[in-house]
Image (cartoon, grey):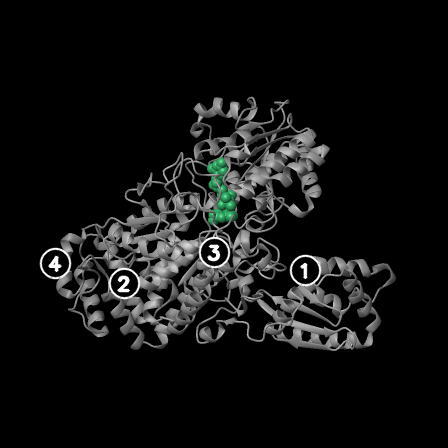
Amino acid sequence: MSADYEHELFNELAAFLKSRRNEAHRFFHHLLDQERHFLLRSELIDALQQVCDPDARDPLCDSPLAAVIDLAQESALDHAWITFALRIRVARWCYLRIHLETMDLERIPVSEFLRFKERLASGTPADDWALEVDLEPFSREFYKLHEADSIGRGVEFLNRRLSSRLFEELGKAERHLLAFLRVHQYRGQQLMLNDAINDVQELRNALRRAERFLRDRSDDEPWSELSQTLRQFGFEPGWGNTVKRTRNTMRLLLDILEAPSPHNLEAFLGRVPMIFALAIITPHGYFGQANVLGRPDTGGQVVYILDQVRAMEKEMHHRLKEQGLDIEPQIVILTRLIPEAEGCTCNEHIEHVAGTRHARILRVPFHSSEGEVMPEWISRFEIWPYLERFSLDAERELLAELGGRPDLIIGNYSDGNLVASLLSQRLGVTQCNIAHALEKTKYLYSDLYWQDNEEQYHFSCQFTADLIAMNTADFIITSTYQEIAGTDDSLGQYESYMSFTMPGLFRVVHGTDVYDPKFNIVSPGADPDVYFPYTSSERRMAHLNEAIQELVYGETGPTARGQLAAHDKPLLFTMARMDHIKNITGLVSWYADTPELREAVNLLVVAGHVDPARSDDAEERAQIEYMHELMSRHGLDGQVRWLGMHLEKDLAGELYRFVADSRGAFVQPALFEAFGLTVIESMSSGLPTFATCFGGPMEIIKDGISGFHIDPNHGDQAALKMAEFFQQCAAAPDHWDSVSRGGLKRVEARYTWKRYAERIMTLSRIYGFWKYVSNLERAETRRYLEMLYSLQYRPLAQAMEQHPAP
Ligand code: UDP
Ligand code: LCN
């Protein structure tokens, strides 16, 4: 929407409020009758529908007020004022206030809107001296994207900018490039250029000389045969393993010096040997390779990182080899050591990552402020007091393990990203963040009413940590677009950090900018060795059949409740951690209440534990107890099979295919799912998939083609949608096949680890180069964020340790 339209709408609304006072009043009165200070988009739309009478040609239906409601994300009101936060387009907001008596309309700044919310939430005047966090002034000078469609493609934008800047500033920028090519070293060995080349003209001459020298040599002659001569010209290893590759790399550089293009720049930088050692930070949960999935706080992030590491090590190795370097890439996953970790390896200091050459997990314990090692698992919501000390201990161990600094630090989730910030700042290393799931949008009003949930969730620490980490990161990887910038009518997870208030803590008027080119969408995949189509009979693990039959149709026991009476029905399968947000109990109650679905399928649930005593997590225990209640209340034991156990990957992979054999489906009913690895796993198995419309699955699945969306807030409709699918499949079996094929096609095209690894390796080089040539220390931002860390985060985290959770 253009600024003109916005202006016009404002004027039309102002005129409407005066000329159609009665209509406007009717609507506002209806809102006031609800006796609520805050209304969300869907509630505003419902309210408008309730007062509008379309048959009577109600002028409200088609009014500028209705147009404004359509743009509103939320409204705050009392008897004197109503305010609206309008999302004009992705991450472009404007705030309006209407006086309910005079119907005067005005625009207000975001801080005013937030102050109004604070006053309504607390019932006392907003604090004039509340800490206002505003990062905008620091980033005014930097390049920004303009189009919502470009969001998440930061590296492409940066490439274009960089190449045109190199082009415009030939001379100065070339010197940066030259200096950049001379900094590369590996353990004291000089790479790329030596000091025989001292300026750009000398570089050009040397490249031409080398081209002549290489012209008549055979393509596959190895670097070792060329190195002596090329060294005299000024070239060190890193240009290629053969004549052909060396020639190509040199040609790319000559072309860049002649007239830089984004394509050549990306191709050239992709070849520069910059990344030899990686540190991947993931402190919370149980990080292990076996018997951990499904434990509290232990799910997709672990799967993601292990698959990511395997794919990246391969890619690093491949690139180094192609550049003629006999260097073993090093990857260390840094996590927490949990001394009391029964049944898994999380109490081991170091562990090799299976399926890799050298990658390893390095575990460092948490210490209390008294210096004692913390023995047991600690919820991800409770770990804040331990992270600073963890980062210091981890730094020492990491440096020893890698024999030096890593070349890139990748943080994961709020805690890992904060530790990545601390480490990257201290070591001066490029920082990449991966959020996996930002908690802020998962819980309604988690910011405004943070104090109500503080004891359980400690969002004061988490959101402060998020703000710090997303602003220190050099680049950010997300799995979907909506994670950054939402959809046309819902805001993105990162976008939600743009402005928000946590009364009594701080008021964020500009916390992040999703138009910053640091954001890149690089989606993960599903391990192709484990999650492959049910039709690939020769790869199927027949030896697991018996175990699976027993799991699905066996008797009840300590890890299984419910015994399926009918063995000929398709299975509706779900598998997730037993968090409230995963909504497994929601699914069970929809199933219970929908005779059509109960008639069509059996429900198979893999989640949590059947025995609540086996869970350390209060939220999980509550869900387990509710699950038992539902099964008993609705008499579900003959139709629902509930397995309370962690399935190892191979078994899980075969189980998806077993469900596909039954012409069943997978369902992911979460209230919100940041991405949803189970969704792509089931699609990769050829299993038709129903998944929540809130979060990543909205983007992964094209409704009706590669699977289906369901709305967890309307469980009755979701259940009917699933029942209809099975009825349709019974009538026309082709329907099942076509959805199965649609899902397979979609994941093959978009969600693969190979593509992921290639992208990350290219991105890290381009952001590294960008940081170098633009001298992008962002010292002011850094100092501001350090203040936020020491004045805000530290006291909050320290206070938590003095009052540990019950
Ligand atoms: N998973 C598993 N066995 C279990 C429970 C979960 O293998 O018993 C795996 C599942 O296959 C998926 C991951 O754990 O790879 C869950 O990731 P997802 O992104 O769906 O959710 P998260 O738990 O990260 O929120
Ligand atoms: C965390 C989540 O909640 C999931 O939605 C993601 O798939 C997982 O991390 C991996 O990124």
Categorize mark 2 by other alpha carbons within 10 Å: few (<14), some (14-19), many (20+): some
Task: Tell me which numbered mark, 1 or 4, is placed earlier along the sequence.
Answer: 1
Give, as a three-letter code, the residue at label 3: Met
Q: Quadrant of the N terminus?
A: bottom right
Q: Is residue 249 visible?
A: yes
Categorize mark 3 by other alpha carbons within 10 Å: few (<14), some (14-19), many (20+): some
Does dot 1 land on a helix, a strand or a loop?
Answer: strand
Which residue is label 3 attached to?
A: 800
Q: CA distance from mark 4 to mark 2?
A: 20 Å
Residue 251 is labelled as 2
Which residue is label 4 attached to?
A: 228
Judge whether 779 appears above or below 43 on screen: below
Q: CA distance from mark 1 to mark 2?
A: 57 Å
Does dot 2 land on a helix, a strand or a loop?
Answer: helix
Residue 480, image x and y in percent? 51, 54
Give, as a three-letter code, the residue at label 4: Gln
Categorize mark 4 by other alpha carbons within 10 Å: few (<14), some (14-19), many (20+): few
Front position among marks 1 and 2: 1
What residue is shown at x 61% (from left), y 24% (from top)? 564
- Name the residue nearer the viewer: 209 or 720: 720
> Mark 1 and 2 residues: CB-CB less than 8 Å, in contact?
no
Which residue is label 1 attached to?
A: 40
Does dot 4 land on a helix, a strand or a loop?
Answer: helix
